[in-house]
Amino acid sequence: MDRSRISEIRIDDYDYPLPDSRIAKHPLAERDTCLLLVRDTQGRLSTHSFAELPSLLPSDSMLVYNNTRVINARLRFRKGADGTGALIEIFCLEPVMPSDYAVNFASTSSCSWTCLVGNSKRWKEGDLTRTVTIEGHTLTLRATRQSKEGASSVVCFSWDCPEVTFSSIISALGEIPIPPYLNRSTEESDSRDYQTVYSRIDGSVAAPTAGLHFTPAVLSGIDRLGIPRREITLHVGAGTFQPVKTDTIGEHEMHSEFIAVPRALIEELAGNERRIIAVGTTSVRTLESLYHLGCMLHSGIEASHLPQWYPYSETHPDLTAEASMAAILRHLDTTGSDTFIASTRLMIAPGYRYRIVRGMVTNFHQPRSTLLLLVSAFLDGGGTEWKRIYDYALAGDFRFLSYGDACLFI
């Protein structure tokens, strides 16, 4: 399907009524007791407990999940030397200087981020400061707005204590940024509940929520069946919460997200005979982006960033997954790196041809969202199968969105 036809897809066709009462405001006490809607290869729908997942996976599966960890991205300051002025909320989105996440978090004097600023009109000039004690060290944290473009600003954070890293600062002072559609304030329990049990690489401002259902018991059950588990990294941006506000898909601009895939997994994908089951839409986007980035390298195109419409371009080569992975491996040989790093704006919409992913574990998504388009493209290429599944869930006891129940699509 070419870009012009995809551009004409109307977002009204991917809307559905979602009462607030069906949005889970908190997770269940035991993560793996949530419901799991299963659609098998014959299209049959059934209801299970998530704890049953290991036995429901095809024996030839390989499970790929996102190991990103949500950071305490929301920082609060008050204007005025005495800290009694207007409340200014700074929501860190993406590192600017240093641009590498790990290096930025390890900074010991200053760093800058692209941020959203709440109550921005009250912060017209001057710096914001907080004097705090972290890890036994008293320091003054300063926020300086360096530039503003559209809804976002570049904010420089600086502090006067080299014994404390920026990672320690946001861990101590920041808040977990729970989804806005929960319509509640962050609670202490969210710092535990809004992380997957396998999260380990700091960088996301939203959780890869399909992974929230996994427990050590479920992971052990998968291991006992001999189903391999592999990790990738995609740092989820705030754009994941944004519904499509334009009438057609062609007018919607996808947000950019950081991805990292280890060489060992790329080597496995190059000679893969297993059915790749992606945990969450973030893993789907990473794996499918990987294929297209390999196609860019094969074509002699620099591949540090995947544009949202490249998969639909007339110049896109029709490579096998193995050939695409081989191109990435040759690139890694040249750079001497063990990890392939890039960013992606991949738009997966009805008409998209999946190249790597053959199954997914995912949650129920917002109406009029790009995530719903991704699921529809997987189920039947953009037909009405997603409506049948969501009608089934709404007629049952399924809970929706980040803290809600899950689906398994093969």
Image (cartoon, grey):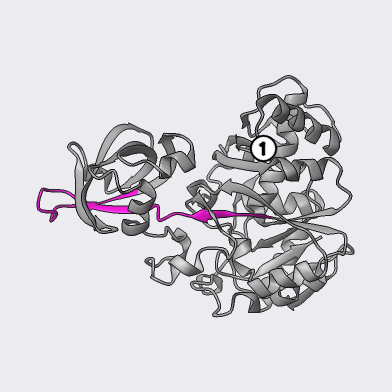
For mark 1, what is the residue? 338
Q: Position of residue 151 (x, y in %)?
A: 38, 39
Image label count = 1
Query: What is the span of residues highlighted in magenta in the rendered image?
Result: 65-90
Q: Position of residue 335 (x, y in %)?
A: 66, 26
Residue plotted at (81% across, 62% down):
227
State the quadrant of the C terminus: bottom right
Magenta highlight on residue 108: no
Which residue sits furthest top? 300
Q: To which quarter of the image does residue 353 belong? A: top right
Q: Position of residue 375 (x, y in %)?
A: 71, 54
Examine the rendered structure and indicate whether residue 286 appears above or below residue 404: above
Q: To which quarter of the image does residue 303 belong? A: top right
The answer to whether residue 353 is seen in the rendering is no
Residue plotted at (61% across, 59% down):
365
Kind of residue indicated by mark 1: Asp
